[in-house]
Image: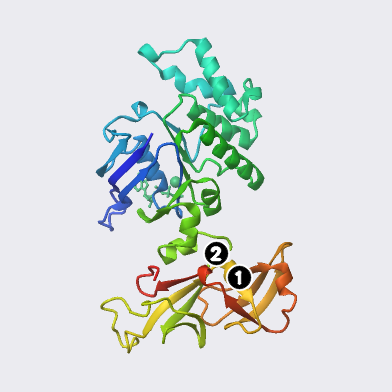
Amino acid sequence: MKITLEHLTKRFPNRNKKIKEDVIAASDLTFEIPDGKLIGLLGPSGCGKSTTLNLISGLETPTEGRIYFGDNDVTDVPPENRGVGLVFQNYALYPHLTVEDNIAFPLGNLRGKDKLTKEQMHERALEAAKLVQIDTLMERKPNELSGGQQQRVAIARALVKMPSVLLLDEPLSNLDARLRLQTREELSRIQHETGITTIFVTHDQEEAMSISDMIVVMKEGVIHQIGKPQEVYDHPGNLFVAKFLGTPPINVFEGEIRDGKVYIGDEAVLDAPNGSANATPGNTDGASADADSYRKIYVGIRPEGFIPDENGALTVKLNKIEVMGRDTSIVAEHPAFTGTTIRAIVPSEDVEGITGETVRFSLKPKKVHLFDHETEETI
Ligand SMILES: Nc1ncnc2c1ncn2[C@@H]1O[C@H](COP(=O)(O)OP(=O)(O)OP(=O)(O)O)[C@@H](O)[C@H]1O
Ligand SMILES: [Mg+2]
């Protein structure tokens, strides 16, 4: 089922009487989710992810905008008639019911021509349980299951009505790291097997990147970028997106474009891309004396963008070298760095020559991103 959001906005009245403005949990969201794809909805806490899911499921009504499933406008259709399966951020199983009855529970609400016999419900519950591989645990109660198994019961319960849309709100949040990895791979498999259009909410960028066909990056109710995970990683549209994706995070330096070069401190580290020195219109304050050849910027360098090179242009103060097996992490400092410590990830064999108090790097141009200092948009 293709999902289309058109100018979708959700405002909540502010309960703090001193603040007049509403909370804008979702602001003018417009995008299309192609049929049968898995979309990762990604962003920091409070950015509006759950609100967006609740709007799509019908649990919240939008202040403005429309929602379409296929060609049908479902904006005013109640949640139970939208054909969505939901796994909530704080999913809850019924403690007194067995796994089977928990999974079959939504089927009990079917009425009229859709009403199922006990036998049919049993079959459908078993099918859903098989998908998440808990079909051998059908007689247990939730408190006799591990956290991961419980989470899978919640997913089976969302699948049992064979929804055309599956909405998952941080479905793996209660799992330890290993189970999380395993369950996310299972989710990806189930999604491929069933072809159900799925929206997967997480604040974990690695999780979103690893299983999504497309990611949507949000901040403060606004969509900042939509695209294939690798595309968004390689071509972030602004500084926020660049910082949000990637572990360790991108290294951000204060920088300048002068005379056709990108400078960090006194060092010219790269050639500036064509036309990049032209400051944005109106940005003609004292500091940028010559708007044609000077521009204040941020220089973002991915950890894998540094090449140890004794003739390299960027010199940093070495703090320590952390060997991690295949790769080595070089931890360093630089006066123009905007964070606390720089992290460069390099192949272990490339660090052998590194001794002394400073390290010099040359940079992989594709791993360097330049941002306007004021707008923080990519140059
Ligand atoms: N019923 C409500 N009334 C008022 N404000 C709300 C309500 N629900 C959500 N908000 C606000 O809307 C914003 C978005 O909330 P939402 O729950 O969608 O964020 P989220 O991205 O899911 O965050 P998290 O990762 O912490 O779950 C937040 O600022 C939140 O405080
Ligand atoms: Mg949430």
Q: Taking 115 as reference, is 173 left or right?
A: right
Q: Are marks 1 and 2 in contact (CB under 8 Å)?
A: yes
Mark 1: secondary structure: strand
Q: Is residue 217 visible?
A: no
Residue underneath mark 2: 249
Looking at the picture, which amino acid does disc 1 mark? Arg
Q: Which mark is residue 213?
A: none
Q: Quadrant of the image for the C terminus?
A: bottom left
Q: Considering only vertical position in the picture, is 97 above or below 27?
A: above
Which is more N-terminal, label 2 or label 1?
2
Residue 33 versus residue 144: which sits nearer the camera?
33
Residue that numbered label 1 is attached to? 343
Which quarter of the figure has residue 284?
bottom left
Q: Amino acid at mark 2?
A: Pro
**Quarter assignment of residue 68:** top left
Q: Position of residue 114 (x, y in %)?
A: 39, 15
